[in-house]
Image (spheres, rainbow, N blue to C red):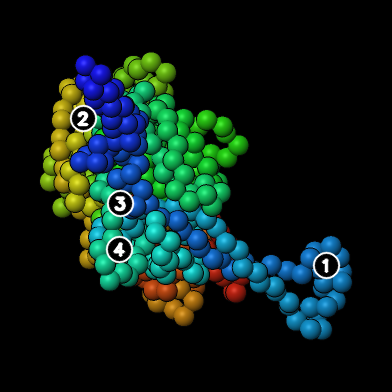
């Protein structure tokens, strides 16, 4: 009886010890299983694919004494020439691998104007990265590193069925603190944000902390799918973060890898806002409606059956109330995508689906005449204007033959082909900014598209 008591007590002690120490056959105790939540599982799986990005920027500036005393600066530069100064600045950001062979995704503003980009992975190993492609409008960039071994990566999931209130997890390197995890919920969808003279649309809003350094890192759902790319663009706000939806990113990334830039969807539609009352359309708080005023010959729109006079009401299920809203939706699509439109024609609702294409190179001359009202030829400084249509966009502001177009939206133009390519890349924008050079002086002007 006495021995039976000792044996029972000993077995009880072993049982408690096994709970506390864990079952070596599984490597996880009963208590640890309760702590091994879905969030922990997602973080363990995703973290190895998240990287820290350190980019180096060379900034040109003048001697501060010259700025303090302009007279002294002018005197010095008159005799000794200009004295620019340069300094190196560093910016920190995040990113994540999207393939085992070293392609990674981040924000464009993380690597903008960088001269050198270093990437550090989870085990502390560093790589030099090169830019494969970048798109400022969508704030996305693809980098590439060389590695002898396959790298851990994350696949882009779908953001189409996101629910407000569902749990999301952000991983990044805020303020240089590597692999920081924050958890929150989806606070709102389809947010439009204006920051640094840019307008971003269709963003995911979350209360998961996204701070400088988090930009470019993944936003994951509770099952570990990448549903967004974090971007710290809304300064001065607490408890508010934003992410680019993965569905938009997926379309842009393919272009950046294949082309080095975003290739916009061309529909062949020319749209203008028309007074709704003039057309007999009554809509609450809607003074204008987007109307098709021209359909390019042999374009996706013509092939789909759209016609002049069609009033566009929906693009891909999104209600649109103006030309700018139509273009905003189209900017999230790339050449080759299918786009569904709903229109009103002669009072009847109709539905169309068209397959977009890239703008055809053989129609570049036609594009420049239609969008800018000019013909050009190559010159050393850019695209030399040889003919100006008086009623064209450039003709109306006083451009003339002999002027040179040197830049489009900040991109250097070295030939007529470059100019046409940049205008084609801006086909779904409301306006473009041109650098016009006349007699050695440059002028920036904005032209509606």
Q: Is residue 342 visible?
A: yes
Decide: few, some or many residues near mark 2? Use Cα within 10 Å; few <14, some 14-19, many ≥20. many
Q: Nearer the viewer, mark 2 or mark 4?
A: 4
In the picture, the quarter occupied by the N terminus is top left
Residue 365, placed above or below residue 80: above
- Asked whether the beta carbons under mark 2 and mark 1 sit within 8 Å of each other, the answer is no
Residue found 28% across the figure and 56% down from its top: 152
At mark 2, the secondary structure is strand
* Earlier-in-chain disc, 3 versus 2: 3
Distance in Å between CA atoms under marks 2 and 1: 62 Å
Position of 349 relative to 169 (above/below): above
The residue positioned 48% from the left and 51% from the top of the image is: 178
Dot 3 falls on a residue whose secondary structure is helix
Tag 1, which secondary structure? helix
**Where residue 276 sits in the image (x, y, percent)?**
36, 24
Q: Residue 102 got which mark?
A: 4
Q: Is residue 19 visible?
A: no
Q: Residue under label 1, please give it.
A: 65
Residue sitting farthest toward the bottom: 79
Q: Is residue 144 left or right of residue 99?
A: right
- What is the secondary structure assignment of the residue under circle 4? loop
Which residue corresponds to mark 2? 342
CB under 8 Å between callouts 3 and 1? no
Quickly name the residue at label 3.
Answer: 252
């Amino acid at each position: 009886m006495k021995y039976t008591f000792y044996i029972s007590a000993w077995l009880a002690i072993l049982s408690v010890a096994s709970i506390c120490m864990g079952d070596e056959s599984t490597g996880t105790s009963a208590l640890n299983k309760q702590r091994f939540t879905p969030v922990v599982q997602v973080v363990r799986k995703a973290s190895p694919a998240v990287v820290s990005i350190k980019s180096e920027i060379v900034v040109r500036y003048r001697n501060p004494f010259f700025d303090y005393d302009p007279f002294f600066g002018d005197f010095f530069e008159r005799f000794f020439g200009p004295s620019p100064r340069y300094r190196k600045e560093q910016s920190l950001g995040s990113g994540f691998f999207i393939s085992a062979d070293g392609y990674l995704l981040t924000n464009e503003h993380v690597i903008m104007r960088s001269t050198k980009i270093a990437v550090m992975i989870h085990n502390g190993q560093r790589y030099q990265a090169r830019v494969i492609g970048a798109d400022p409008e969508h704030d996305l960039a693809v980098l590439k590193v060389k590695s002898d071994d396959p790298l851990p990566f994350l696949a882009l999931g779908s953001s189409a069925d996101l629910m407000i209130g569902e749990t999301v997890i952000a991983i990044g390197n805020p303020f240089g603190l590597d692999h920081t995890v924050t958890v929150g919920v989806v606070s709102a969808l389809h947010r439009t944000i204006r920051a640094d003279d840019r307008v971003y649309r269709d963003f995911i809003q979350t209360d998961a902390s996204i701070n400088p350094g988090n930009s470019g890192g993944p936003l994951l759902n509770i099952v570990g799918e990448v549903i967004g790319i974090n971007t710290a663009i809304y300064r001065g706000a607490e408890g508010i973060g934003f992410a680019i939806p993965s569905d938009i990113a997926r379309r842009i990334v393919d272009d950046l890898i294949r082309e080095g830039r975003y290739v916009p969807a061309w529909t062949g539609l020319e749209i203008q806002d028309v007074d709704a009352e003039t057309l007999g359309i009554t809509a609450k708080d809607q003074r204008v409606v987007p109307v098709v005023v021209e359909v390019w010959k042999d374009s996706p729109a013509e092939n789909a059956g759209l016609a002049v006079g069609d009033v566009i009401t929906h693009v891909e299920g999104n209600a649109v109330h103006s030309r700018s809203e139509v273009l905003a939706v189209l900017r999230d699509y790339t050449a080759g995508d299918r786009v569904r439109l709903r229109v009103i024609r002669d009072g009847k609702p109709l539905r169309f689906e068209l397959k977009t294409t890239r703008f055809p190179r053989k129609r570049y001359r036609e594009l420049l005449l239609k969008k800018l009202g000019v013909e050009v030829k190559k010159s050393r400084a850019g695209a030399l204007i040889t003919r100006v249509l008086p009623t064209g966009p450039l003709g109306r502001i006083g451009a003339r033959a002999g002027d040179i177009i040197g830049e489009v939206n900040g991109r250097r133009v070295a030939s007529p082909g470059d100019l046409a390519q940049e205008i084609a890349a801006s086909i779904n924008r409301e306006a473009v900014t041109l650098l016009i050079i006349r007699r050695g002086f440059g002028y920036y002007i904005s032209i509606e598209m």
